Structures are given as C-alpha cells and as structure tokens.
C-alpha cells in the first residue's frame, strides 16, 4: 500500500493519503473503534452506527469478529454480514484482539483463532497478532516485529499490514532501536503502531518518544504512518500529530459526550447541556427520547466532532497554522519546550511517501 504525501506541515506533521477500493483514506485521521470490552451492545451498535459514520475507516477487534461472527443484530443479519455489507463504503481495520483478550475470560485467544477471524472478515488492514506483556515483562523489539510479520504473511490479500510494538515505559531512548529494526523490514509492513499508554508515563513523555521516532524515521527515509492506539483525547491527538503520528483510535465516541466549543469530554448523559446545532442534536426532544435513539444520536454527534477536529488539524497543517492551533488550545508553551531542540527543517525531508 502506498501512502502519498500531500503536504508537509510544521514540526513533524503531514497530510498523506491512499485510495483503497475507490475509498479515500487521508491522514491525520481518527478511527472509530468497536470493541466488546465495556460494550455489551456492540452487535446492535455495529448495525445502527457503522453504515453512517463520517469516517472512511472503522476498527474492530479480531477477537470480537471471532466471538460475534454469528451473533444476530436486530434486523436478523449476523454481525459478519453487517461488517461485509459496510465494505461498500467503509474500509475495515482489523485490530489484533490483544486488548480484549486481557479482559475476556471466556476465550483462550490464540494465533489460530486470530487467523480464522481475519480470514472470515477479509479486512483491508490487519494488525498482526500480538501478546500484551504483563507488568514487569518486556519483549525484544526485533522478535515482536518478526513474529508480527510472520502472522501477516498468512493473509496475502491485505491492503495494509500493521505491526503493533509493545514497549516498556520510559522508552524514548528506544526510538532509535525501533527505527533501525523498522528500516531493515520497511518493505514488509505499511503502518507501525504503538499503544499510547506504553510509550510514556504522561503526554510529555509520549510526545518525546514520538518526536524521537519521527526524527529517526525521516533521517532514515522511512515513510510509514505511525498509529497511536487507544488515543482519543482532542489535545493529545493535536500534540501527537505535531510529533509525527497520523492515525488514532479509541472508544470515547460511545462512552462519553464530546464537545469542541468548549473542547471537553463529559459523562455520556450530558449531551443536552451542549445546545449543539449538529444534525444529530438539533431536533432532539431530550425529555422524551428513547434510550436507543439517545445512544445513536450521542454516537453520531461524537463521531461528527472527531471528524470536525481532524478536519481542523488537517486545515492547520495545510495552511501552516498548526502552531496557531496549538496556541489556541493553550499548548504553545509545552510545544515550544518539546520542539526547541528539534531542527524541523532537517526533518522535513521533502520526499514523497
């Protein structure tokens, strides 16, 4: 899969994209994640929401495909049929299932079950099978990479091969090692992923890691998008885009209530307080609304806000105003501290993706 660079912005930001099955994927982007962890209504949510999301890509766990493939949604179809029907207008990004496997005790998740789920789903993108390390455990980066590539080799029809690497905390000094390993295997994968909470103890630490990795990638000519898994905070996304990340996903779009004016994340029942004029709030009768309708309106409102936020970030990159957007979010002092020792001109290689 070829990501084409459309525009290089301030710091390490860029706009890039690819056309897959006549569907455009443009980064930076947020992927709505569907996960059974904490969502016992995932099957009905897939039926109600997936066809209508404003994003062109949706993420679903391979473990959930395995568990729900034959589950029926309200209109009588199976979850697998719902997912396949969505492929007319959406790209499917199949996560490894490792996140859900940490919490589900009703399935012994394995490479064999993962492979079966990916074969059933036939997604556009697949994250390689992984094992999330326990507390105090660590895995060699090269070994993780090679195991991931071996898993992905079993699925030749993929348009995007995603390698997810787990790192112990305090890892910004591992960025060079990760880049060296990625460089030697750059023809074998399309996207490199890292879990947000594993690359630093706080947002500053995480930005430093991403800056280090992005700097090494550009110095070595590695033109691969970085996916920060589990990140759905508006300001964190903005900082990580400036630090070189391009793809984000998360679950807050159905767990919380999101606002862009002012920018905040609230408890899910707070949508009536926003006086929002989006299409999903404008004509709502909050006093008599059915719970299912409220859930649908909340989800679509939130996904609309994510789409608007990523559009604002893309516009700021395109016009050279990312630093101004950071200033508007009162993040300019932090961003100056993060990038003061970075020669951004050197990192803006001018090469296409």
Image (spheres, grey):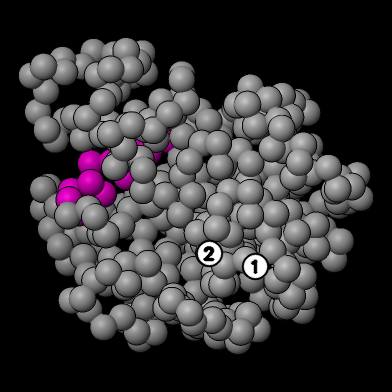
Q: Residues within 10 Å of mark 1 (few under 14, many from 20)?
A: some
What span is colored magenta in the figure?
A: 41-54
Up-down: is 113 above or below 183?
A: below
Report the predominant secondary structure element of the magenta stretch: helix
Q: Residues within 10 Å of mark 2 (few under 14, many from 20)?
A: some
Up-down: is 203 above or below 65?
A: above
Residue under numbered circle 1? 171
State the residue at coordinates (55%, 83%): 139
State the residue at coordinates (41%, 55%): 59
Of 70 and 146, the residue lying toward us? 146
Image coordinates for residue 305, horizontal then vertical, percent: 44, 29
Tell me if 13 is positioned left or right of 156 in this view. right
Give the CA separation, mark 2 to mark 1: 8 Å
Tell me if 33 is positioned left or right of 166 in this view. left
Residue under numbered circle 2? 198
Q: Secondary structure at mark 2?
A: helix
Locate the N terminus and report the quarter of the image it occupies: bottom right
Q: Quadrant of residue 163?
A: bottom right
Up-down: is 163 above or below 21?
A: below
Q: Are circles 2 and 1 on residues that touch, CB within 8 Å?
A: yes
Tell me if 4 is positioned left or right of 105 in this view. right
Image coordinates for residue 100, horizontal then vertical, percent: 32, 67
State the residue at coordinates (50%, 59%): 197
Of 339 and 315, the residue lying toward us? 339
Q: What mark, if any, has residue 123 been given in the picture?
A: none
């Amino acid at each position: 899969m070829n990501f084409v660079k459309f525009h290089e912005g301030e710091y390490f930001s860029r706009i890039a994209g690819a056309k897959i099955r006549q569907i455009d994927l443009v980064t930076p982007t947020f992927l709505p994640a569907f996960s059974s962890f904490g969502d016992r209504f995932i099957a009905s949510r897939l039926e109600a929401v997936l066809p209508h999301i404003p994003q062109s890509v949706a993420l679903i766990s391979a473990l959930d495909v395995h568990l729900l493939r034959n589950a029926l949604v309200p209109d009588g179809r199976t979850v697998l049929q719902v997912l396949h029907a969505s492929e007319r207008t959406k790209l499917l990004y199949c996560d490894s299932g490792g996140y859900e496997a940490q919490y589900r005790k009703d399935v012994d998740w394995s490479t064999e079950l993962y492979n079966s789920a990916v074969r059933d789903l036939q997604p556009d993108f697949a994250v390689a099978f992984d094992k999330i390390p326990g507390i105090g455990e660590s895995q060699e980066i090269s070994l993780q990479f090679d195991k991931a590539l071996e898993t992905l080799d079993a699925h030749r029809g993929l348009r995007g091969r995603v390698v997810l690497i787990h790192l112990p905390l305090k890892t910004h000094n591992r960025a060079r090692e990760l880049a060296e390993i990625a460089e030697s295997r750059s023809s074998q994968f399309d996207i490199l992923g890292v879990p947000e909470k594993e690359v630093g103890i706080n947002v500053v630490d995480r930005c430093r890691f991403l800056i280090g990795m992005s700097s090494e990638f550009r110095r070595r000519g590695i033109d691969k998008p970085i996916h920060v898994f589990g990140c759905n905070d508006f300001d964190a996304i903005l900082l990580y885009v400036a630090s070189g990340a391009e793809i984000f996903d998360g679950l807050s779009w159905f767990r919380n209530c999101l606002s862009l004016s002012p920018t905040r994340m609230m408890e899910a029942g707070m949508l009536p307080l926003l006086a929002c004029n989006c299409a999903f709030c404008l004509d709502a009768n909050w006093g008599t609304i059915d719970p299912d309708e409220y859930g649908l309106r909340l989800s679509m409102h939130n996904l609309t806000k994510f789409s608007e936020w990523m559009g604002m970030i893309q516009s700021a990159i395109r016009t050279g105003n990312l630093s101004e957007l950071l200033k508007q979010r009162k993040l300019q002092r932090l961003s100056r501290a993060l990038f003061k020792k970075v020669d951004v001109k050197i990192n803006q290689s001018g090469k296409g993706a």
